[in-house]
Structure formats: C-alpha cells, structure tokens
Image (cartoon, rainbow, N blue to C red):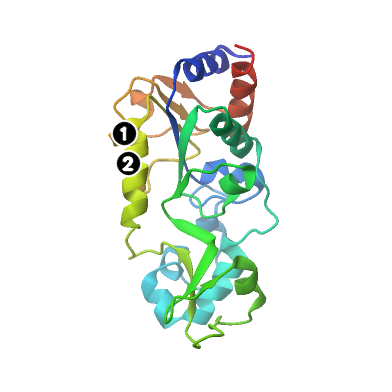
Amino acid sequence: MSQEIETLARMLKESRKVAFFGGAGVSTESGIPDFRSEQGIYNTINSFGCPPEEILSHTYFMRNTKTFYDFYRSTMVYREARPNEAHKALAKLEAMGKLTAVVTQNIDGLHQAAGSRTVYEVHGSIHRNYCTKCGKAFSLDELMAMEGVPHCDQCGGIIKPDVVLYEESLDSRTIEKSVKAIEAADMLIVGGTSLNVYPAASFVSYYNGKRLVLINKSTTSYDRYANLLIHDSIGKVLKEAVALLETL
C-alpha cells in the first residue's frame, strides 16, 4: 500500500466533517464516458451535425426537441451503469459518520444507488423529469418508454429532463447547500474532475481548511493548492483508503 493511501486514511481518521466534490471521472469507472477527454462524448459524437454543447442547450431543446431527445437518449443515459468502488467507498464513509455530503457534477444518480443519502446534484439528474406545462413528474423509465418527443399524459405538455442545460442557471438551493457543506468541512476530497466547468468548479474555493485532497488521473489548476495530491484511479484510491481507515 502506498504512502499516499496511508496519508489519506490518516487524514480521514483525524477528520469529522468530510465533504466530497466530484465530476465525470468518478463515473467513468462505471462505463459512463466523460465529456472532454480524447474518448469523451464531445469528441466522439459527430453524427448530429453540430457540437454537443449546442445540442445540450436550452435554445436547442426548445427549437429542435426531437433531435435533442435522439441525442439525449443515445448519449446521455446509461441505465446499465452500476456504482463503482468510488461510489461505494463514499457511501461507506457516510455510514461511518465521516462524510457529511457529496457534491456532484454528475447526473447519473450512481451515488444514491451506492447508498449515499446526502447528495447535492448541481447539474440535476436523469432520474427526475417533469412536464414543462403542468409540472407533473416522470421517472427515467417512463421517459425512456416514450417514443420521439415525450409528452405529458395529463396535459399534453413536453417533458424535460431535470438536467441543467447550457444557457440555464444552476438551482439556487442546491448551490447554497453545496457551498455550506464545503465551507463547514474540515476535509475536502476533490475527485474525477478537471475543475474547468464553471460555476460548479468554483465551489472548491469555499473550502478554508487544511486537508484538501485532489484525486485525479490528470492535472488540474488546483493541484498546487492541495495538501495531498494523488494521480490515480479514484475507485482504487478510495477503496484502499477506506479499508485502511477501518483498521486504524
């Protein structure tokens, strides 16, 4: 076991309010591609005739709803994905009374599937969908069972996934809860994110403690601020650190 894992486990042991902030890299180990890497969604989808950033915008959703849903169903939803070791380790940390909150940029719901209870989804979730006219809620299964543009069976309105599209604002209550959790933390673990997507990436700046841990395969602009920096698989690192924590 590496010195980095031992250091992380001891930092966890000494902490009482751990917050986790994560991005797409947390879910890549569950088979969900990220967005901006070489094999990511933004670089591998070319059949729709325009960049994914345009398709995933509010304007495009309103003007080209059917094409939006063709892209969304084929590219953004991975119902076969299951929680990986990172999700499971974070859920275990919460059950141990160490982890106070998961703040995630992901929309896949895998943290909850692993057992985490306090999860703030800053970009929304594919598992929540609503009618844009009357507000009726629909599950992911209900949405995916509909062909073409999904319409509400109550009023006929168009159904929209509760995910934050380009040109849309983040939910203010989710932002507030996320920031409070990070501000109150005596340890912040950041993992699986390039910290390039704003405003979510700016949440890290609200941490004022001395146990900032960055776990990422690539470098980030925050690396120089980390008290512990680990360039490795986040699932492997968290699994080993939590296992060691249980023995300390």
C-alpha separation, residue under disc 1 versus residue under disc 2: 6 Å
Badge number at residue 169 = none
Determine the residue positioned at 60% across, 73% down.
Answer: 143
Query: Residue 17 is drawn in which quadrant?
Result: top left
Query: Residue 148 is drawn in which quadrant?
Result: bottom right
Badge number at residue 179 = 2
Query: Residue 183 is drawn in which quadrant?
Result: top left
**x then y, percent, for residue 160:** 48, 73
Q: Residue furthest right?
A: 80
Q: Is residue 124 left or right of residue 184?
A: right
Q: Quadrant of the N terminus?
A: top right
Query: Which amino acid type is shown beneath numbered disc 1?
Result: Glu
The residue that disc 1 covers is: 183
Q: Is residue 133 left or right of residue 154?
A: left
**x then y, percent, for residue 240:** 63, 22
- As displayed, is residue 36 above or below residue 96? below
Provide the secondary structure element on which disc 1 rests. Answer: helix
- As displayed, is residue 155 above or below residue 32? below
Query: Which amino acid type is shown beneath numbered disc 2?
Result: Val
Dot 1 crowding, Cα within 10 Å, few <14, some 14–19, many 20+: some
Dot 2 crowding, Cα within 10 Å, few <14, some 14–19, many 20+: many
Instruction: Work out whether residue 198 can be spotted.
Output: no
Determine the residue positioned at 59% across, 63% down.
Answer: 75
**Residue contact at pointers 1 and 2, CB within 8 angstroms:** yes
**x then y, percent, for residue 53:** 42, 63
Q: Quadrant of the C terminus?
A: top right
